Amino acid sequence: MATGGILLSLRPSTHPFASRPLALLLAATVTVLGCRAREAPSPDASAPTNGAPPAASSAPAETAEARQPAPPTPRREPPPGPVATVAAPATPAAPLAPCTPPEVLQLGPTTAPAEATIVVLHGFGTTAADMERVARALMSASSRLAVLIPDGCDAADGHPRGRQWWSRARSADRSAAMSYAGARVSRLVTAELERRRLPRDRVAWAGFSQGAMLAQWMAVHGSPTPVAAISFSGRLDDDSPVGPPVGTPVLLVHGARDTMVPFAEAARSEATLTLRGAKVERLDRPTMGHAIDDDSLRAAIAFLTRTLRAP
């Protein structure tokens, strides 16, 4: 169990940490587009290597109390729900199915136009609302940072109230499944950025669990090259040919007690990303499981602040 203040159960080397209090991290304006936020569904435990998201309650209308940094109560992951057997998997070469999330949350600067955008992706079986606290914290990296938090493209296997970016039941080829999901999400985000008139040339990605896997994939394949990528408890499945060095700054945060996405995946991701030219930093959390704690957030904020200021 993590020893920090906020332990986000989403219902998701040594590193310098930022010292600012978390109470300052929550000052932002949120625009909720689409359907209203729903109660976070039960996370999935059916795929130990896919990452079941921690669960945090959906964000209510903001009040003085809601702006305080009191953490939600962590919850244990329930047993897995049933996973339907489906037909042959889609591949990246197949026509892309549209990604039509029920809602997309947008947080934005209140005093000036945005100069950069960060896309925050939730884990399996949860929704955009479950990542709002994390997104609000990351916004403190810059007063001119806009945030998009989309729901996953599809209803989650066995958890119809939650969302997923791809289905493990559709393919045993994890690299192909991730590539297909990455292409769908890229198309969705490109359209959303254009529609909302948000910066498209300076985009960062952050995610937890299944969302973190996509954030790592975007660090390699995102176009234009992302200004940064932050992965909380993720991994990278990518057997595509190694191309020119990407140069994306990447922060990998992982708990040594993670039983959903094993801690060893952090070293594998670091090696894969480094081979492809990413500039990788790691924060290993010795007492943390499959979660995001205070120190993880502080490190992510400090990392994002530095990368956004870089020329």
Image (cartoon, grey):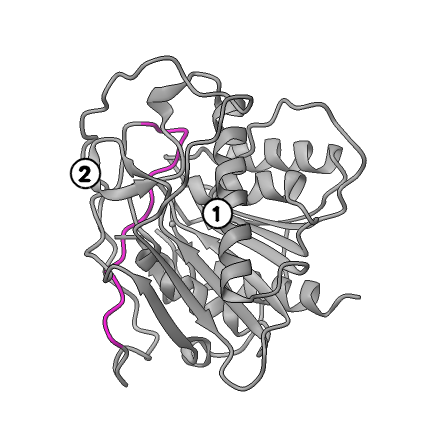
Residue 10 can be seen, yes or no: yes
From what the image shows, is residue 256 above or below residue 115? Answer: above
**C-alpha separation, residue under disc 2 versus residue under disc 1:** 31 Å
- Identify the magenta region: 47-61
In the displayed structure image, the side of residue 37 where residue 233 appears, left or right: right
- The amino acid on which the numbered mark 1 sits, given as a three-letter code, is Leu
Could you tell me if residue 295 is visible in this image?
no
Residue 177: % across, % down = 47, 26
Give x and y (percent) for residue 114.
59, 74
- Corner quadrant of residue 29: bottom left
Tell whether 218 sits left or right of 139. right
Identity of the residue drawn at 66% across and 24% down: 240
Numbered disc in front, either 2 or 1: 1
Residue shown at the point (37%, 25%) measured from the top left:
168
Pinpoint residue 192: horizontal percent, then vertical percent.
49, 56
- In the image, 301 versus 85, the foreground residue is 85
Q: Position of residue 135 (x, y in %)?
A: 44, 64
Q: Is residue 51 magenta?
A: yes
Which image quadrant: the C terminus?
bottom right
Residue 231, placed above or below residue 165 = below
- Mark 2: which amino acid? Pro
Q: Could you say which is closer to the camera, residue 122 or residue 295?
A: 122
Which mark is on residue 188?
1
Reading the image, the residue beneath label 2 is: 78
Q: Earlier in the sequence, mark 2 or mark 1?
A: 2
Q: Secondary structure at mark 2?
A: loop
User: Main SS of the magenta segment?
Assistant: loop
Q: Is residue 37 left or right of residue 92?
A: left
